[in-house]
């Protein structure tokens, strides 16, 4: 009996050992550890953003911690997040307050993105922060008082945003601060002198026209009232004979005038870092075009919208996969552009943009199919796209003569004649009018500028990047709230609300037309020295009856004054600070093609004090 009992005990132990090893094996293959709180906070940050470069594509909630995620570094001792560094990634959206849960974060680098909304006050909970970089975004609202809690901070850069209000005194308590930059915003009031703020120089506060104090050598008692500067806008009053400002939207004019002046430093920064960004994109070429690891074997899928090309899909895909950084011909906010040359010498432009995420690929393909069906002589033709492992590659017809920006502003380029400029103005207007009125669904471009007007061998203009504009899904409001665009071309209401409308495109086109007429950039350095942008300067010239000073004298020899002023009148209508007072693009096309504005009066100011002609108003819907 005793022997039998021992045998039973052995069987029991054996069963326990089998259960133990089975459980151990199960735990090894099915970890029960949830993602850390830091990882959850980062996923919350990610969910609120639209990313086009795929920087956060390996942020997976199935990971035990975020320490292997791109752009994230952790403390070795406790696996807590120490750095979040995602600059130049075209991130769009608001900054999640959950960032404040990263209380051991030492560096937060989100500069040169498209983040908008307020800076969350919860960042003040990240008391271990030593460096905070939020420059070159679209942040609005006040600088949070809670930033004064970041006592370990040594570097704080909030420059080139849309921040308003005063500088909080709490920043004076950041005694470890060695670098402060809040320049190029809309900050107002006296700069505090408490603590570390008393040691800052004017370089920390430049391009904030509303600031005063010892640091900027502007006595506050003599600081002028915050009214719009002369020439910031007009109000059309029936029966009037002089140009005057509208009190009903004076605040909007102030923001409009201040915004492009305030962001001038951003333009300089972009120019300085352009080469760095370009090289970075070149170095990341293999990852974008071919993926990495197991992705590299996934292959590419080609979708062509037209069957009129004498190439097989295999030939095109093979050529695309053989592209390298020597084929790069440009880069912009949406991605890198390559020249694709086929065996017969035919060329295409390939724009590489980040993946949209698994859940949105079907929608992305559907939208591209719609855009590929749009055909107009003044739009860059979208041929198709290639769904590569790590990027979507849009295939366009190649436009060989560069951009309007190059022809207007590069010294080695021959000056454009008046005839050439008017042809470009008319063609660009036709392309934009087609997007607004003849496409279904209608499209807001959101980034009309001279670098997005490409010229062919006959100097015929083609509007580029319209395929990346947000399609209008609300047929009633025709509004999208995705922040985009280029400073100097943005409508004042868009800077305030972030709401893109067709009238915002009209404003941008008006700036483009002024750029064509004057040969000056919207944020020309000559104008910035006077505290003006192109719109403010042109308005001032018209107010002072010096409108011909706007026009590049080298291109108007032999052109009548009435002819020039008729085009100036069209530009002035387009840049009206009140959106409802701007015309439609169909009206612009009609007026440019007729090259006459009735009544055609040599006194340009009279034009602004009369309503649009009945003929124009009756031809703003449909063709």
Image (cartoon, rainbow, N blue to C red):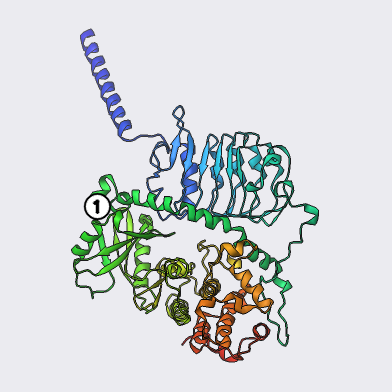
The percent position of residue 621, horizontal first and vertical second, equals 51, 85
The quadrant of the picture occupied by the N terminus is top left
**Residue that badge 1 annotates:** 298
Q: Is residue 621 above or below residue 110?
A: below
Where is residue 514, by image quadrant?
bottom right
**How many marks do you count on the picture?**
1
Please tell me whether mark 1 sits on a helix, a strand or a loop: loop
Residue situated in front as seen by the camera: 349 or 129: 349
Residue farthest toward the right in the current orientation of the protein? 221
Q: Is residue 458 above or below residue 534?
A: below
Going 52% across and 75% down the picture, which residue do you hit? Answer: 513
Please tell me which residue is depicted at 67% across the width and 72% down the height of the picture.
Answer: 231
Residue at image position (46%, 28%) is 78
Looking at the picture, how far across and down is residue 323, in whole percent?
A: 26, 57
Q: Is residue 119 visible?
A: yes
- Up/down of 405 relative to 263, above or below: below
The x, y position of residue 72, in whole percent, is 44, 40
Q: As drawn, is 521 to the left or to the right of 204?
A: left
């Amino acid at each position: 009996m005793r022997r039998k009992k021992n045998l039973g005990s052995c069987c029991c132990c054996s069963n326990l050992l089998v259960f133990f090893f089975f459980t151990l094996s199960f735990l090894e293959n099915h970890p029960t550890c949830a993602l850390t709180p830091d990882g959850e906070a980062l996923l919350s940050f990610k969910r609120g953003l639209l990313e086009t470069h795929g920087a956060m594509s390996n942020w997976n909630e199935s990971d035990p911690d975020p320490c292997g995620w791109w752009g994230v570094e952790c403390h070795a001792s406790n696996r807590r997040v120490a750095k979040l560094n995602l600059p130049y990634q075209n991130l769009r959206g608001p900054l999640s307050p959950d960032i404040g849960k990263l209380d051991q974060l030492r560096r937060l680098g989100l500069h040169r993105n498209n983040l908008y909304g307020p800076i969350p006050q919860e960042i003040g909970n990240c008391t271990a922060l030593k460096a905070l970089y939020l420059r070159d975004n679209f942040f609005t609202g006040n600088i949070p008082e809670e930033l004064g809690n970041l006592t370990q901070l040594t570097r704080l850069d909030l420059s080139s945003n849309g921040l308003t209000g005063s500088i909080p005194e709490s920043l004076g308590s950041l005694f470890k601060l060695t670098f402060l930059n809040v320049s190029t915003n809309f900050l107002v009031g006296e700069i505090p002198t408490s603590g570390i703020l008393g040691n800052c120089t004017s370089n920390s506060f430049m391009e904030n026209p509303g600031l005063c104090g010892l640091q900027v050598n502007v006595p506050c008692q003599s600081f002028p009232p915050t009214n719009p500067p002369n020439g910031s806008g007009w109000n059309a009053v029936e029966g009037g004979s002089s140009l005057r400002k509208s009190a009903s939207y004076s605040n909007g004019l102030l923001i409009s005038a201040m915004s492009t002046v305030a962001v001038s430093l951003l333009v300089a920064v972009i120019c300085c870092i352009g080469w760095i960004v370009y090289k970075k994109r070149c170095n990341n070429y293999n990852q974008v075009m071919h993926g990495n690891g197991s992705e590299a074997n996934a292959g590419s899928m080609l979708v062509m919208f037209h069957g009129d090309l004498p190439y097989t899909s295999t030939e095109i895909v093979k050529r695309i996969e053989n592209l390298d950084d020597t084929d790069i011909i440009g880069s912009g906010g949406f991605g890198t552009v390559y020249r694709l040359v086929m065996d017969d010498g035919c060329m295409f432009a390939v724009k590489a943009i980040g993946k949209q995420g698994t859940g949105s690929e079907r929608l992305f393909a559907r939208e591209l199919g719609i855009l590929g069906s749009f055909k107009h002589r003044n739009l860059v033709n979208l041929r198709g796209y290639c769904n590569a492992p790590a990027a979507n590659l849009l295939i366009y017809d190649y436009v060989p003569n560069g951009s309007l920006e190059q022809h207007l502003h590069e010294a080695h380029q021959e000056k454009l004649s008046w005839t050439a400029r008017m042809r470009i103005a008319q063609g660009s207007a036709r392309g934009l009018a087609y997007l607004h009125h003849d496409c279904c669904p209608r499209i807001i471009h959101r980034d009309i500028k001279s670098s997005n007007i490409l010229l062919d061998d006959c100097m015929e203009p083609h509007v580029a990047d319209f395929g990346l504009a947000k399609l209008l899904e609300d047929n009633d409001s025709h509004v999208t709230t995705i922040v985009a665009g280029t400073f100097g071309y943005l409508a004042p209401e868009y800077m305030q609300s972030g709401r893109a409308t067709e009238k915002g495109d009209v404003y941008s086109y008006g700036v483009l037309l002024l750029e064509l007429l004057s040969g000056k950039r919207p944020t020309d350095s000559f104008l910035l020295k006077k505290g003006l942008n192109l719109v403010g300067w042109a308005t001032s010239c018209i107010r002072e009856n010096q409108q011909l000073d706007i026009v590049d004298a080298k291109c108007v020899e032999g052109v009548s004054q009435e002819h020039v002023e008729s085009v100036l009148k069209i530009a002035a209508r387009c840049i009206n600070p009140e959106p409802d007072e701007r015309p439609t693009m169909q009206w612009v096309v009609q007026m440019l093609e007729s090259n006459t504005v009735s009544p055609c009066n040599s006194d340009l100011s009279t034009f602004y004090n009369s309503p649009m002609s009945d003929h124009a108003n009756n031809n703003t819907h449909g063709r």
